[in-house]
């Protein structure tokens, strides 16, 4: 608002730093004319700029959505797709803005996700003068008046759009951007062979419902028509506790390329979401507990076989728990024949658990056999004093036990004179009184003279058949293992002696038996060979050894694994083998599964 002259007057006033020469120069006429010209030029430029702004504020295009609808949709046919001058197919770009992976139902193979489905195309019929606005936003019923591509999801299970926003944005050049927020559930096939280290690709398969490639081409955002390119998935930053999405998703999201396939005359656009399971949950909640339950089953191998209730609990309860664990895993898996790492591993661990229970059954069976043999030896030793007396008598008479046993054993009734006289008297009584009670009848109902009776020698010496039980049973066992025959000249070597002793629940190692046999023979006054493994026992020695075996069992005690294993009963052998072998078997199976998975 100041004139050029007033400005110069203010400047030309003398001040503390202004000289008189300067003031005189500024007051000169030519300087004043130059300042006036500059001011006039600047004022003209400012006026021209103001005039331009006012000119731009004046527009001929639509200012509001209502004006756009009135100008552009009157006579617009939404059933006809937009075409270019050369009548080429309409190109529709598609992209899913993924905001969250909600859930993966691995039993049904369904992924639930949330996001925005975005589509772009160009409709020249909707181009408008953009002097008043850069875009027109259509919502609600206004969107129903224009053409939109009939894109459907080929593997869709369920789509939820109710309550979610949807809009169409139109640019001045006719470019259209359709945005719809939705929740999708899509069907995919899951490859669970490597569960819980499985990796998958979820696909959203898009196609046009009625337009083939002659009329409409599908492509991912920014891609090339007819090729796998562009950005099909654009994910926002997100986190998921169960599934591992592509690297960097928690901070910057991720993008994946659109994959295009042409089937027949139709474009199919695949929007791909790669994801992998975070294995810690299943590994810690299934594999680790299963191994710990095997440890519980392993404890039973250290419990005495005679404590059956405790061992039964330790053997059976882990099997039931493993079965429950398997059920919980299979409850969330598809019912099919597909092999799965986790399921196979769990089945093997369950079999190992059952194997421990089977071992318990085998040990108990062995214990029953051992108890029966031990009880039999105890019963036979009850007649030991009488048997010892007969052995001493045989020794005095220089008679073998085999020959003595032959004399005292039962005889056919017809060969016993005293018994024949009794039978004759009984026959006379039977004829007079028809008293059949005094007639001895055998099991076939034959007369007594064809049966057996106590031998004359046994009757005279007061020997009962019960007194012979020890020697008779010992003879039976001796004959069974005497490879040289069952006659009186039969002998047992140390290996036969060891095998025969097992029938009396007496278990000795191969290193113990030669020393015990030779020690016993020397105590009996017999000479022994230099090589103790060459020593032999006859039947008499064998019977006397049975009565004194407890006195020799500590002889030549050794602590090697083989001798330890041979000198314990079968029930203890099974437990000893299980204590060593079971952990190795469990470790080997886990090593197999881990290494096998790595190679796979």
Image (spheres, helix red, strand yellow):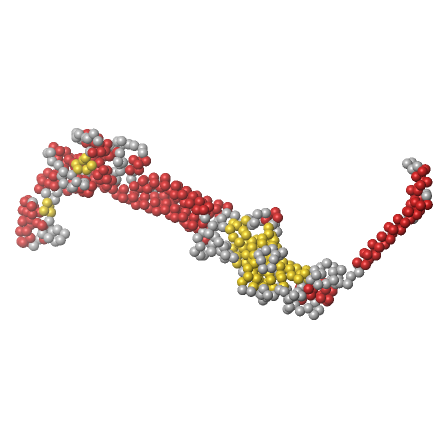
In the image: residue 596, left or right of residue 42: left
Residue 219 vertical position relative to residue 552 in the rendered view, above or below: below
Residue drawn at 93 percent across, 47 percent down:
33
Residue 143 vertical position relative to residue 548 in the rendered view, above or below: below
Where does the image place residue 41, in percent across and percent down from the top left? Answer: 87, 51
In the image: residue 384, left or right of residue 241: left
Where does the image place residue 509, in percent across and percent down from the top left? Answer: 27, 36
Pick whichever, 56 or 481, lies toward us: 56
Pick whichever, 548 or 120, lies toward us: 120
Residue 175 quadrant: bottom right
Pick whichever, 347 or 554, lies toward us: 347
Q: How many marks?
A: 0
Pick whichever, 47 or 72, lies toward us: 47
Where does the image place residue 106, in percent across and percent down from the top left? Answer: 50, 54
Residue 507 quadrant: top left
Residue drawn at 12 percent across, 41 percent down:
406
Residue 260 quadrant: bottom right
Residue 331 vertical position relative to residue 380 in the rendered view, above or below: below
In the image: residue 420, left or right of residue 501: left
Q: Is residue 598 visible?
A: yes
Q: Is residue 332 visible?
A: no
Where does the image place residue 57, in percent across and percent down from the top left? Answer: 79, 58
Residue drawn at 77 percent across, 63 percent down:
60
């Amino acid at each position: 608002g100041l004139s050029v002259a007033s400005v110069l007057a203010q400047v030309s006033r003398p001040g503390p730093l202004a000289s008189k020469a300067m003031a005189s120069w500024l007051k000169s006429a030519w300087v004043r004319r130059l300042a006036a010209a500059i001011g006039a030029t600047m004022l003209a430029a400012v006026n021209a700029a103001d005039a331009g702004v006012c000119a731009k504020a004046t527009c001929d295009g639509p200012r509001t959505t209502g004006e756009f609808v009135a100008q552009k949709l009157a006579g617009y046919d939404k059933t006809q797709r937009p075409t270019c001058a050369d009548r080429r197919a309409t190109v529709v770009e598609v992209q899913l803005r993924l905001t969250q992976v909600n859930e993966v139902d691995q039993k049904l193979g369904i992924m639930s996700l949330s996001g925005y489905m975005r589509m772009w195309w160009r409709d020249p019929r909707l181009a408008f003068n953009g002097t008043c606005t850069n875009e027109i936003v259509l919502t609600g019923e206004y969107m129903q008046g224009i053409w939109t591509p009939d894109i459907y999801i080929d593997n869709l299970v369920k789509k939820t759009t109710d309550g979610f926003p949807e809009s169409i944005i139109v640019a001045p050049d006719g470019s259209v951007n359709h945005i719809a927020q939705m929740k999708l559930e899509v069907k995919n096939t899951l490859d669970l062979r490597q569960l819980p280290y499985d990796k998958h690709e979820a696909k959203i398969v898009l196609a046009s419902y009625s337009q083939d490639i002659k009329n409409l081409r599908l492509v991912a955002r920014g891609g090339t028509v007819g090729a796998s390119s562009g950005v099909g998935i654009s994910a926002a930053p997100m986190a998921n506790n169960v599934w591992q999405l592509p690297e960097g998703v928690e901070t910057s999201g991720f993008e994946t390329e659109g994959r295009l396939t042409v089937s027949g005359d139709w474009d199919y656009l695949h929007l791909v979401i790669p994801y992998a399971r975070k294995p810690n949950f299943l590994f810690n909640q299934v594999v680790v507990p299963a191994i710990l339950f095997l440890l519980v089953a392993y404890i039973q191998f250290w419990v005495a076989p005679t404590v059956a209730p405790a061992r039964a609990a330790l053997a059976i309860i882990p099997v039931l728990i493993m079965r429950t664990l398997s059920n919980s895993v299979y409850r969330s898996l598809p019912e099919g024949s597909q092999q799965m790492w986790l399921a196979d591993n769990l089945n093997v661990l369950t079999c190992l658990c059952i194997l421990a229970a089977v071992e318990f059954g085998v040990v108990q069976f062995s214990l029953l056999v051992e108890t029966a043999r031990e009880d039999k030896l105890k019963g036979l030793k009850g007649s030991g004093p009488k048997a010892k007396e007969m052995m001493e008598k045989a020794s005095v008479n220089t008679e073998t036990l085999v020959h003595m046993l032959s004399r005292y054993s039962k005889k056919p009734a017809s060969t016993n004179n005293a018994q024949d006289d009794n039978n004759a008297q009984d026959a006379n009584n039977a004829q007079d009184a028809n008293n059949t009670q005094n007639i001895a009848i055998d099991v076939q109902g034959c007369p007594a003279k064809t049966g057996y009776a106590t031998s004359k020698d046994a009757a005279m010496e007061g020997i009962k058949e019960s007194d012979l039980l020890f020697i008779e049973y010992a003879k039976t066992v001796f004959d069974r293992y005497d490879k040289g025959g069952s006659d009186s000249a039969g002998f047992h070597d140390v290996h036969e002696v060891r095998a025969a002793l097992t029938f009396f629940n007496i278990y000795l190692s191969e290193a113990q038996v030669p020393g015990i046999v030779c020690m016993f023979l020397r105590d009996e006054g017999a000479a022994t060979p230099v090589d103790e493994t060459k020593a032999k026992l006859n039947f008499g020695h064998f019977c006397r050894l049975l009565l004194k075996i407890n006195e020799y069992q500590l002889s030549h005690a050794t602590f090697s694994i083989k001798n330890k294993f041979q000198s314990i009963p079968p029930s203890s052998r099974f437990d000893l083998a299980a204590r060593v072998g079971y952990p190795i078997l469990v470790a080997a199976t886990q090593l197999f599964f881990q290494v096998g998975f790595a190679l796979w």
